[in-house]
């Protein structure tokens, strides 16, 4: 399952996609009425429907569908809007409008969605989902920024540990710890 990151808003210069990310119904409607393509894609191949579904904005999903958005559109990883959403009302909208995609010959997209199929093996799905989210996180921020973020978190954790323990490094005249 993919995830739409908060910083996606800084990754697009397409007004319709930005409006879908922001949940701006009125602006989305004005853009679509001015003959804006409802199936325009971002750098990952996601359409406005993908972005609105991931944010749980069923109103924008309905608007895009009304203006001809392709419910079967897949991003570059093969995900439809149904794969990206985890909001019940959005899932119901997509399903009620006939979104049925065959992932393989024996398994449909509806059967593979963890919210709709309690029989999925949770262990394998969770690890796979975490791996995908982590890969997208690193792809979004970049390797060096993620490394810097981990380093800053480690330093903050170390500082908190020193503060809580009362022992500060590089300071003389500290009370000694009892062993």
Image (tube, helix red, strand yellow):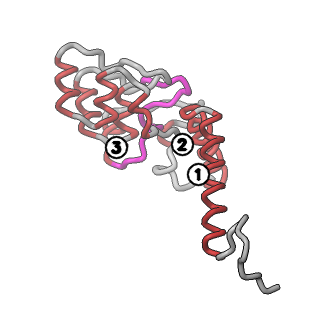
Name the front one of labels 3 and 2: 3
Q: Residues within 10 Å of mark 1 (few under 14, many from 20)?
A: some
Return the residue nearer the eye: 56 or 22. 22
Of the two numbered discs 3 and 1 on the same chain, state the one appearing first in sequence.
3
Residue farthest bottom in this picture: 178
Question: Helix or strand or loop: what does disc 3 sit on?
Answer: loop
Question: Helix or strand or loop: what does disc 2 sit on?
Answer: helix
Q: Name the residue at 43% across, 23% down.
A: 73
Can you say whether 149 is above or below 176 in the image?
above
Residue 102: image x %, image y %?
A: 52, 30
Per the model, the C-alpha gap separating discs 3 and 1 is: 23 Å
Q: Which numbered marker is on residue 109?
A: none
Q: In this view, does 112 lie to the left or right of 14?
A: right
Residue farthest right in this picture: 179
Instruction: Name the residue carrying label 3.
Output: 56
Q: Main secondary structure of the magenta part?
A: loop
Instruction: Name the residue carrying label 2.
Output: 112
Q: Name the residue at 66% across, 76% down.
A: 165
Of the two numbered discs 2 and 1 on the same chain, state the one appearing first in sequence.
2
Return the residue nearer the eye: 105 or 63. 63
Q: Name the residue at 35% across, 32% down.
A: 98
Can you say whether 44 is above or below 108 in the image?
above
Number of labelled discs? 3
Q: Which numbered marker is on residue 120?
A: 1
Magenta segment range? 73-88
Question: Helix or strand or loop: what does disc 1 sit on?
Answer: loop
Can you say whether 103 is above or below 170 in the image?
above
Q: In which quarter of the image is the C terminus?
A: bottom right
Are dots 2 and 1 in contact, CB under 8 Å? yes
State which quadrant residue 67 falls in: top left
Residue 4: image x %, image y %?
A: 45, 38
């Amino acid at each position: 399952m993919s995830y739409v990151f908060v910083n996606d808003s800084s990754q697009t210069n397409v007004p319709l996609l930005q409006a879908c990310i922001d949940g701006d119904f009125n602006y989305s409607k004005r853009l679509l009425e001015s003959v804006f393509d409802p199936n325009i894609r971002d750098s990952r191949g996601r359409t406005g429907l993908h972005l609105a579904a991931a944010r749980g904005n069923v109103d924008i999903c309905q608007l895009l569908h009304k203006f001809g958005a392709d419910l079967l559109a897949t991003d570059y990883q093969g995900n439809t809007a149904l794969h990206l959403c985890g909001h019940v009302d959005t899932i119901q909208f997509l399903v009620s409008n006939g979104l049925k995609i065959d992932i393989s010959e024996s398994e449909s997209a509806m059967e593979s969605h963890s919210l709709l199929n309690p029989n999925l093996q949770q262990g394998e799905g969770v690890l796979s989902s975490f791996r995908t989210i982590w890969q997208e996180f690193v792809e979004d921020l970049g390797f060096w920024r993620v490394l810097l973020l981990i380093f800053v978190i480690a330093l903050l954790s170390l500082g908190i540990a020193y503060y809580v323990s009362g022992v500060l490094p590089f300071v003389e005249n500290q009370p000694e710890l009892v062993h």
